[in-house]
Image: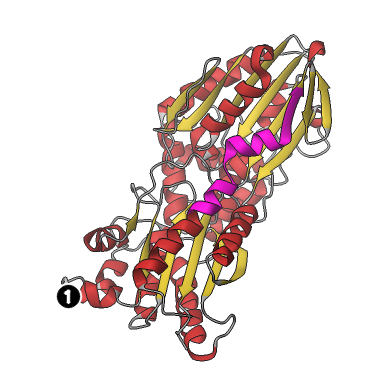
Amino acid sequence: MPLISSDTLRKDARHIFDAALLAVDPEKAIHRYVKCTNHTLSVDQQTYDLETYKHIYVVGTGKAGGLMAVALESILADHLTGGVVNVKYDHTAPLKHIKLIEAAHPLPDDAGVQGTRKMVHLLDSLDEHDLVFCVLSGGGSALMPLPVSGVTLEEKQAVTGQLLACGATINEINTIRKHISQVKGGQLARLASPATIVSLILSDVIGDPLDVIGSGPTVPDPSTFADCRLILKRYHLEDTLPSSVVQHLIEGEKGQAAETPKPEDAVFNRVQNVLIATGSQALEAARIEAERRGYHPMILSSSIDGETREIARVYAAIAREIHTSSQPVSPPACIISGGETTVTLLGKGKGGRNQEFVLAAAPGIKDLDQTVVFSAGTDGTDGPTDAAGAIADGFTMERAEQGGLNAEAYLNDNDAYHFFQALDDLIITGPTNTNVMDLRLLLVGPHAV
């Protein structure tokens, strides 16, 4: 097999990423699971007689919420009464009956609060003759904020910011969010009861636990106030978080504040939760596309978490192993993984976990011919930037040095964005309107050994 140029490897990486995105298109996913014939609605083999319901509403939240709402408007047609869905700014879609509320992510804002209040007002008026569709996808936790009484939005923003900065996992962050919210952790189902709820869920969480995705507003919550207190202690946050939040969690642990509803709660008797798209589906689509392009693909894992820089060094080590021994797969090779790593912020730069991953991997693949590392968020956004991620090859370090860029200094300042911006190696997709965590690729050409 002839050599593959670095330019071809880079283009292949992007095509493989795009194939993964197509596999988890939220509009197509809903059409796979939801069908309507005359007055009979079928959702993942469960049927509903639409003539038995007075009203059908759509509520929900997440980066994929716009396209999910479009699909439901198309399927439900004249049966649909209306609805409210919170989405990230610039993640809109053309709708007739469902109102989209644009709000901030990852730190919530007042627009998100107002949109959530509209949902609560709608749900408060429902009875057993109403049907509610709830669309949930990545980003939903931040996009559907409604703090408990006594906690302000600014205080909730401070909590989210500190949890993100200290390196807490998404599961830990959502455990706290549920217990300072009026809607998360099954509480949206409590508000809508006794209406029937069909929740359509697009996963952005490792392992696809329904109680964690979007903080599980329609799912029983296994976490407790006691778990929240342990998280505060683990990250030494009891003296830094707003006192109102800490006090609420203390009161909850003492039984002085209402717990989130648990699995045995009757509010879930009329709830159907359906997982419609996952990171594993995206990885499998990437594998198929890589194979179609002539690579020997290997899915390393769909569940990689941990410190971004450490995972990046492992990827660089795998690249060198392929070059020296053709293991764990012979070139032309494509190593694929998904998940969501964490970045402990030490500097004051700009970037996200995908850009930082590629910057941390770049020194480890220095001078390796026919080698490319690619990492991007499937939502099209990496951290507080307009980039989805970044790409590097065996000569990125040489190009950086020629341009006067010190990779170690940029990494120490968590400033991967400006490093790759200078090299024109940012991955810019714009909003993808889906979200199934991150996708990482390592491509090694055929004559590497």
Name the amino acid type tagged 1: Gln
At horizontal 46% and vertical 37% (from top left) the residue drawn is 156
Q: Does residue 346 show up magenta in the picture?
A: no
Q: Residue at x 48, y 23 (%)?
A: 94
Give the image location of residue 41, x and y in percent.
78, 23
Q: In which quarter of the image is residue 355?
A: bottom left
Horizontal and vertical percent position of residue 80? 65, 15
Above or below, 371 relative to 282 = below
- Total marks shown come to 1
Please name the predominant secondary structure of the magenta segment in the image: helix
- Residue that appears at 63% across and 25% down: 72
In the rendered image, residue 257, in percent from the top left (x then y), is placed at: 65, 33
Task: Looking at the picture, tell me which residue is in the foreground, 171 or 443.
Answer: 443
In this rendering, the answer to whether 29 lies above or below 322 is above
Left or right: residue 422 compared with residue 81: left
Query: Visible in this render: residue 147?
Result: no
Q: Quadrant of residue 280?
A: bottom right
Magenta residues (range): 18-36
Could you tell me which residue is drawn at 61 percent across and 21 percent down? 73
In this view, the residue in front, 182 or 69, is: 69
Question: Which residue is tagged 1?
Answer: 402
Report helix, strand or loop for mark 1.
helix
Query: Which of 419/152 is in front?
Result: 419
Q: Which residue lies furthest to the top in this view?
A: 54
- Please indicate whether residue 357 sits to the left or right of residue 30 in the image: left
- In the image, taking residue 2 as reference, residue 196 lies left or right, namely right
Against 74, residue 31 (above or below) is: below
Let me know if residue 132 appears in the view.
yes
Q: Left or right of 357: which side holds 177?
A: right
Q: In which quarter of the image is residue 211?
A: top right
